[in-house]
Image (tube, helix red, strand yellow):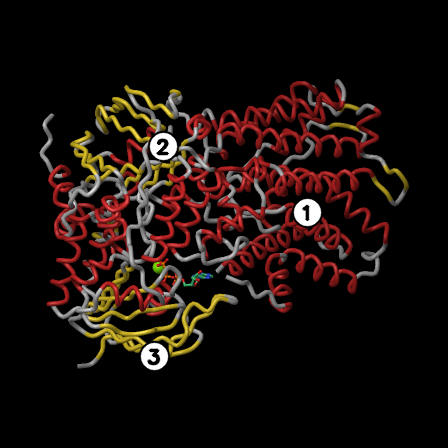
Amino acid sequence: MTTIGTRKHSVKRFLAENGALAGLLVLALVLAISNPAFLTAQNLVNVGVQAAAIAILAFGMTFVVVAGGIDLSVGSVAALAAMVGALTAGPVGLVVGALCGLVNGALVSYGKLPPFIATLAMLSVARGLTLVISGGQPHETDELVTFLGSNLTPMLPLPLLLMLALFGVTGLVLTRTNLGRRMYAIGGNEEAAKLSGIDVRRQKLWIYALSGLFAAAAGLVLAGRLSSAGPQAAVGYELDAIAAVVIGGASLSGGVGRATGTLVGALVLAVLRNGLNLLQVHPFWQQVVIGAVIALAALLDSLRRR
Amino acid sequence: MNALITARGITKHFGATKALDGVDLDVFAGEVHVLLGENGAGKSTLVKVLAGIHDPDDGTIERNARLAVIHQELALVPELSVAENLFLNRLPRRFGLVDRAAMRRRAPELLDRVGLRVHPDAKVRDLGIAQQQMVEIARALDQDAGVLILDEPTAVLTGTETDRLLEIMAQLRDNGVGLVFITHHLDEIQRVADRITVLRDGRSVGVLGPRATTRHMIELMVGRPIDEQYPREQQEAGEPLLRISGLTRSGAFEDVTIEVHAGEVVGVAGLVGAGRTEVARAAFGVDDYDRGTVEVDGKPVRRHDVQAAIRAGLGLVPEDRKGQGLVLTGTVGQNLELATLANRDPRRLREIADRLRVKGHVDQPVRELSGGNQQKVVIGKWLLADPKVLILDEPTRGVDVGAKVEIYELVNRMTAQGRAVLLVSSDLPEVIGMSDRVVVMAHGRVAGELPKGATQDQVMALAVQESTA
Ligand SMILES: Nc1ncnc2c1ncn2[C@@H]1O[C@H](COP(=O)(O)OP(=O)(O)OP(=O)(O)O)[C@@H](O)[C@H]1O
Ligand SMILES: [Mg+2]
């Protein structure tokens, strides 16, 4: 059969597939008109930096969600990795993050726990360990980690670059690697994936490990920015990460999701927070607005799917 | 007489695809109206338009009776019990709560009517696919609708269950119900049809009477005659490629020995519940077994290990395409590449899709394909992996006559290249016509083996024999 790809169709298709992007552009436009402070280079760079940590967490989350799971532990793992990094060295933090992810993966695939439960347990354990090893005190980060949070030039903050680099990695993993293709298969139909010869359990191990690794990276960036790792860092960030992934069009029932969507989702959250601050909306009300936007994004998405 | 349903000029697009193009259809009381057409001809779309699930882009529908529809894809809730599924949209209530007692009282009666022997409290997910289909039929019967639409209900049924269903349909017709019936089995059409509307590429190309010949039906729906429905080209049998010996799992199958040689197609016939699918799954490593061995090309295959089975050169096209064969969220291409992730190449994917004549694009979501075309994608996945032995479990379920022949040609091609095929099928003409030998299973055991040219009666005689154990 031939596919008739008219121009009109492809434009429509593009918008349909990138509803979040359209939303982001509208949001930015509204803010640009209502407050001149928004569209300054400095402010936009700030938005990028604010988005970085959430975006990096959300990239890792995308792998898990595409594969039909969920990872509630990313905020705690980020904090633990950053704390370990501060007490020892940055790379050790990354290893610890990946290990936490591996434990999640093992509980889910070999222990057959629902991902929600396994990672909820890790959320608590990782936060607890962070408190234990820190003695409840913030700790200064070493030079390497501090460098991660620094600006190369005033307009070129490293967190922003890291976010873009990991965005590239995420896209590559999802579209070009066997692991990525398998994520879609597992999330779309685990039984069919199994019968096609995919070692579902082993893949899940790697998928959660990746999420843990990305969480650790986010934790280090966050700590680097402040030059200090705090025991209460990144509390609740897992919810922002999930929101970013969902706003980006991924399906929590698995099999659907893209790196671009997640990046846009994280930017929507950051732009929204920034804009609400600029417009001096009370923080209490900000939460209400953000919640409404998440619901709206999910609604639009489900309408589009019909 | 007034028609129960009158549809005129129905047109429906999906994006650039014209699924229906000016179709007229009448359904009268007391008739079985068959919709016939190739995969993707628009039959299911027409059903969904009639049922009000899709709005037509153009055309009018007049409904003078209540409709009950059995859709092509099963619409049961796997986690709920049989009884709960039967009364899903109208659970009997007492004091505002679900009246379980009333449900349990009424369920057996309904199940009896379709001849299904399962416990009303059994979870639907634990039933076989044919049993699930019968549950769905029972549910539709209970709605006392004036029009009953059945979209390929017999695709997953075996002979006896099909007979039962056709009987029920004849009864309903005599009671003045109007039936719309879709099937790719031409013999069933000859048994029950009062009128046959043939669809091709979304258009109605003719209405035939009850005495239409198979040849006539095929020519009208495919656009060309098909001379040989089962074009098996037998090869000289070579070395044994698959050897299942003494395979046993208590409660499922017992001491099953089947050998398939290079160049051979061995059929496995039997009733639903005879253990055919269980043996196929166990041989492929999906499920474990207690005793016995599986060898491919002389080398034993590790048990309960799908990857080992695939490495050894096995492939399995499972019977339940939606549940086990396809990743519905993925595209045609993503599904084709599933078993061979290591060497995917867009050109190969397109080539396979073309060779199978999949009506759809490689980048199209597979859920948008018609049922028969989805089945071709599952088979294509394994052709791409090029296994030494391919196990086909009900491979032509829901596949139209023309496409069936194409699948059989692929089977011929595989065996001509020295591969082997184990063909599990409930379609007797198919399993007899396409196999070089037929192994018949009953009650989890091999009841006997028949050479090429066996008759349906011989197969059935072995299949229904009483358990000796
Ligand atoms: N939801 C959908 N989105 C896009 N295309 C669709 C959708 N549903 C059906 N189609 C297309 O419409 C055409 C008709 O499909 P339909 O399911 O009606 O075929 P069918 O005659 O029932 O085939 P089969 O015998 O395989 O069940 C096909 O080309 C199919 O790909
Ligand atoms: Mg159909």
What percent of the width, then of the height, locates residue B407?
37, 49
Q: Are marks 1 and 2 on the same chain?
A: no
Residue at 41% x, 33% y: name it: B388
Residue at 78% x, 65% y: name it: A33
Query: In the image, which disc is placed on residue B262?
Result: 2
The image shows residue A116, relative to residue B395, as above or below, that is above
Q: Is mark 3 within 8 Å of ligand 1?
A: no
User: Between A166 and B29, which is closer to the camera in this rendering?
Assistant: B29
Q: Residues within 10 Å of mark 1 (few under 14, many from 20)?
A: many
Between circles 1 and 2, the one closer to the viewer is 2
What percent of the width, then of the height, locates residue A158?
82, 38
Quadrant (top left, top right, bottom left, bottom right) of the C terminus of chain B: top left
Three-letter amino acid code of the residue under disc 3: Arg
Cα separation between marks 3 and 1? 49 Å
Mark 1 — residue?
A263
The image shows residue B290, relative to residue B403, as above or below, that is above
Three-letter amino acid code of the residue under disc 2: Ala
Q: Quadrant of residue A128 in the image?
A: top right
